[in-house]
Structures are given as C-alpha cells and as structure tokens.
Amino acid sequence: MIKVNMRERTANDRFSIKNPLSCLLYLFSLSTNSRRELNSNSHLSVIKIVVTGVLFCVLTVLSIYYRINKVYSDLTVSVRLTDLVQAIYDYFQFNVDLYFVYKYGRRYYQEYYKQYTTIDQVLGECSCSPIRAKINKLVFLFASFWVAVSAVDCFVWVSTYGWMIPFAFSLTYIYLLLKILTNLDFTYQTMHIEVRLGIMRNLILTQYLDCDSLSGATSDPVENKNWFYCNSSSFKRREFPKNSHSGIQWLSRCYLLLIEQSRFINQKFGFRMLLNSLSLLIDMVRFANLAIRIAVGSEYVVNYLAIVAAVSTIFRLILCAAILTNLVHHCEMVYRQNNKIICISDYMLNFKNPEPKLREAITELKTLIQSRPITFHMANFIRLDYAMLMSTASVVVTYTIILLQSLN
C-alpha cells in the first residue's frame, strides 16, 4: 500500500464545504451533499422537498392556465404546442429530480464520500480545492450567461406585450436554471473521478520512468511525447512502495472502487440526465423554431426589437447546447484518462523491461481497465460521449424543419 500522511478529518468536512453550487441546489431542495443538508433532520428535509414540489406545481398550473386563456390564441400552432409540452415536461422533470434527491439522500452520500477517503489513503491526498475552483468558474460562467440572456429576452417581450405576459412565462427561465444546476452537479461528481484517474496515471508514469529501457529500443514514445500523456505542470513524481508491483496492485483496487463511485453517479443522475437532455432537446427545437419565425416576421414583435428578439432566442438555444456540451466534455475527460493509463501500460510492457511481478501487475491493471471501463450513461439508454452531441444536433435540425413546414 502507498503510505501517505493525511490529516484527520471526516469525509463531510472534505466534500461538503459551502460553495455557490451547493447553495443554489439547496435553495431549490436539490442538494444532498451540503454540510447543511448532512447535518439537518431527515424529516425536515422531506418536508422541504414536498413543499418545494407543491409550490412549483401551483406556479406551473397558474402559468399554463394564464397562457391558455390570454396568450395562446395569438401564437402559431407550432409555438403554442412546443411551449405547452415544455411547461408540463419541465415540471415532471423537476419532480423526478426531487424524488432522486430524496432516494439518494444523506446516508448514501456519506458512504459515497467515505469511499473517496479510502481511495485517497492509497493514491495520496487529493485536494478538493482545484475541483471546487473549477466548478465555481463554471457556475459563474453559466449563471452570467443565463442572467444576460434571460434579461434581454424578458426586456423584448415586456416591450412588446407589457409586464403580465412575460411574467406568466418567467417560470421557463427558472426551469432552465434548474437544468443548468443539475448538469453542473453531475459535472462536479465526474471531476472527482477524473482527478483520481489522473493521479493513477501519474503513479504509473512515475513507475514507467523508473523502469530500465528494453535493450535495442531506439526511442521512448512516452518521454518524447510527454505532453500527450501528462502535462508537465500537473505531473508530480510520487513514491511507490519498495515492491512496485504491490503498488500497481493497489491501483487496481482503487480502480475497482472508482467503478463503484461511477455506478453511484449513474444511478443517481442517469435517469435525470435522460430527462434533462430530452428537455434541452425540446428547448433547442422550440428556440430554433421561434427565432426563425421572428426573423421572417411570422411571429409578432415590435419592429425595432425583432432582430434583438431573434438574437436573444438564438442565444438561449446556444446556452442549452453549451449545457449539453459541457456535460459530455467532462465525461470524455474521464474516458481520456482511462485511455492514457492503457497507453502508458502498453508502452511499459513493450518498451521497458519491468521485473516479472511488475509486468504481471501492469498486465492485470490494463486488462481490468479494458474489460471494465468507467462510463457515464443515461439510465443505460445512451452513453454520454461526443457521438451523442452529433445525434442531438441532427434531431434539432430535423424537427425544426418539420415545425417550419407551416411557415407559409
């Protein structure tokens, strides 16, 4: 086992520190891992979830009722239909989010973070500060984008229809914010796995550099292209135990624990991400349809604001696309770490001359990663990767064209 000196502190102290994301999630009863939630009474948490669900139910019903009676008669059929479907779907999705927050509550999260503490006792202490700094930047970026786009869009509709109609549609902006927060919560969890896989890669790379080269080898592809396998700024040589094969065996055990962590993430977020992505898909189709209709004059907007309305709607579409892209990108970053570990292992077995026990341990680790790769998926339906983004783009284009068939 790789021995490190770690400060005595609980898993809750390490992972549940207050940050903007946890505060926003707590505001909408979607947080289970904040210090406030972990220390609160379970019955109070359930009451808070129920009250939040009822409150959003009342607001959604009132909003839909007002739209049907006061607004929909002046809108085209395609805009009316997509807006109504989205309003009902968003509320259903929010209730699913609340249910999964209740199902995977404090007890599950405490065990989940204790597992990371166990992993870090082997890999070496993993500081959560860089992860928090990164997620805080993403929260600030998406929150700023959401505020700017929502403010401009609201200004356009207030200038066109007055205050009441835009107010009835204001719940749409809140639901979009909830989708952003849910995606960022998922992203935050994938970052923890990515960082620890990166530490595993550094440990194997350290062992690779310490091995003697195979006689007759003319070049070292890992050292010559170290920028590909590990950025020099992030690479730190770490000490292995005296028997290096024992250290590799402990890495295999850590990898198995990381697989369990990813299974928890998939169970808590998988179905939610499926609904979330479908909702964003409907949003993108709706925004594309509305933007084109405003641009060609099919949908009424004050003349001097038509271009602003079309542009703001397009930016709302871009925001939805950015949410999905960010989600998939961080999943792909985890997959890249897996691939780098496999590549370094291959080069160690073919360009270096490790001792027999070390060769056997490296082979077992490589086989384990290849046979049981860490993946993130939507309730086992769709794998979160770049190919999914291409499929989403094609669906948006196809259904936007279908809705625009009634343009004339």
Image (cartoon, rainbow, N blue to C red):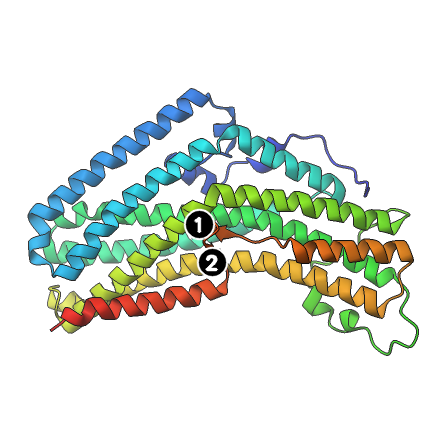
Q: Do we see residue 26 in this rendering? A: no
Between 394 and 324, the one nearer to me in the picture: 394
Tell me the residue at 17%/65% (across/down).
305
Horizontal side of 357 relative to 387 (left or right) equals right
Q: Position of residue 23 (x, y in %)?
A: 44, 37
Q: Do we see residue 185 in this rendering? A: yes
Q: What distance separates the C-alpha of mark 2 from that of mark 1? A: 8 Å
In the picture shown, does residue 324 fall above or below 95? below
Residue density around tag 1, few if under 14, some if 14–19, many if 20 or more, within 10 Å: many
In the picture shown, does residue 296 fall above or below 184? below
Tell me the number on the disc at residue 326.
2
Q: Secondary structure at mark 1?
A: helix
Horizontal side of 107 relative to 325 (left or right) equals right
Which residue is at the far bottom? 218
Give the mark nearer the N terminus: 2 vs 1.
Answer: 1
The residue pinned by badge 1 equals: 183
Q: Position of residue 136 (x, y in %)?
A: 50, 48
Asked if disc 2 and disc 1 are in contact, CB closer than 8 Å, the reply is yes
Tell me the residue at 87%/76% (across/down).
217
The amino acid type of the residue labelled 2 equals Asn
